[in-house]
Image: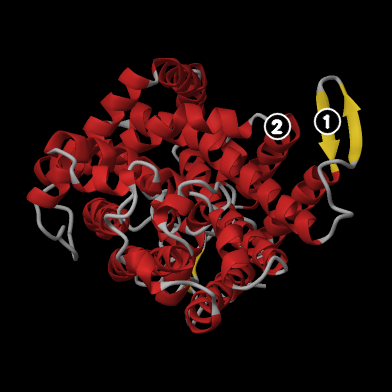
Amino acid sequence: MEPSSGVAEKNPSSTDSQPGLIRGLSLLDSVLLLAGGIIGSSIFLTAKDIAGPLPHPVLFFLVWVIGAIISMCAAFAFAELGSMFPDSGGQYVYLREAFGDLIAFLYGWMLFAVANGGTIAALSVASAAYLGAIFPAISEQHVVFAAAGITLTRVHVIALISIVIVTWINVVGLRRGAVLQNAATWAKFVAMGAFVILGFALGKGHWSNFTQHGGSPSARIAMGMGASQLVSALGIGLIAVFWAYDGWVYITWVAGEVQEPRRNVPRAMVLGIIVVAVVYLAMNLTYVYAMPLTEVAKHETIAATAAEVLFSPRAANWLSAVIALSCFGAMASCTLSGARVYFAMARDGVFFRRMADVHPKWRTPALSLIGQALWACLLTVSGRYDQLYTYVIYGMVLSYTLTVIGLFVLRVKRPDVPRPYRCTGYPWLPAIYVALGSWWTINTIVTRPKEALAGTVIVLLGVPGYLYWKRQSRKSVT
């Protein structure tokens, strides 16, 4: 049973008749939750997409730094909002306070229907697939079930089992879920740290790869880019970088269970992004030490290729284990944090009512966690999670942009709310993020109209549900 005193203080939302969540996450838990949620599979895959348009070492590393800075601009704004509204749901709550129930609901619906469910499904399948590289018995080639257009392999079965186990651990206690998350994140850090340190200390790399800026035609073109070409190339590279940094918002979703949230939520966001930026730069430095950027641009699974170059072909199995662990840890972060958004929606009367229940013994949003797991399992079985997620990526960036705009709105609309932390660089840094986020969203709509339209339709499919739940909520009040 979770403690209800000491380090795990009582959530002010609880009452004598209805148990509430407990504030059992420390600052360290929060930083590890954020970092573990961000670092999934992207750092092992995205270097190719960046080295192609930016084949010069300076530009290649610069785009990772720019991505961290842009993410930090948004995080500063979210940090002020988090200090104002330190409750479960995070970004959902900020959108509700700034723009009303409907916009907030559509954000939460997008998370439940595609973004979080798809992320949990994709990461669990990726983790199982990389385990299959180590243990051949787990393989996509081994079909367990095939009927009605659905094909289940052993990889899918392992993925479903991992979703169920992680969900159950989170259901039976916040502390247990946090311990699982912390262990996975620390193990991930140790494994990646070993890859970097051993790569530079013992690997068969070359320091000259960092200075070969004029040897290849693509590198010479990169250095001869005009301003507009350079901006365009950086924009292309940032698409992959934004994906790699996505997930820093997780900590806002569990703010209702963070100790001293007005202080620790802002700190966790800033510290977490710094930790992730350091890890990403270290990994990419190792890739470039292993091979020049012209080679980096040729390999989809860059981490495995770098491990083979630095050590031996047998190192690929070891790296597969690291990637499997990384994907599993990110899935655990998403599982723990995502359910708190639906919990907040249900508490507001705009989602399944039972998802607002807190388990009387374990003090967790048990039914919200279970509902999330069931939907993620269905998406896993369907095999359509990756395609669905590509449809709403622009919607996710749009939601971040709207939330930062909400900071400006709430400065005018709610000047009375205490703000223990005020956004660093206000109004310029959040304004820069709004400009960049708006540009990226509009550019996506223009260049990928079919995906943007499909994403918009998915989001708007939630409107009938919103109207239904609002009507039911009014009936229960009257």
List x then y, in percent, for residue 464: 50, 16
How many marks the image carries: the answer is 2
List x then y, in percent, for residue 82: 29, 56
Give the SS element for disc 2: loop
State the residue in front, 86 or 317: 317
Give the SS element for disc 1: strand
Visible residue check, residue 338: yes
Which residue is the site of mark 1?
Answer: 151
* Residue type pointed to by label 1: Thr
Quarter of the picture containing the N terminus is bottom right
* Residue type pointed to by label 2: Gly
Mark 2 crowd level (few <14, some 14–19, many ≥20, 10 Å Cα): some
List x then y, in percent, for residue 326: 59, 62
Q: Is residue 234 left or right of residue 151?
A: left
The earlier-in-sequence mark between 2 and 1 is 1
Asked whether the residues under the numbered discs 2 and 1 touch, taking CB atoms below 8 Å apart as contact, a structural biologist would say: yes
Residue 74 position (above or below residue 448): below
Residue 48 position (above or below residue 471): below
Residue at 14 percent across and 44 percent down: it is 432
Tell me which corner region of the image, top left, top right, bottom left or bottom right, holds residue 58: bottom left
Residue 446 position (above or below residue 38): above
Tell me which corner region of the image, top left, top right, bottom left or bottom right, holds residue 177: bottom right
Disc assigned to residue 383: 2
State the residue in front, 471 or 39: 39
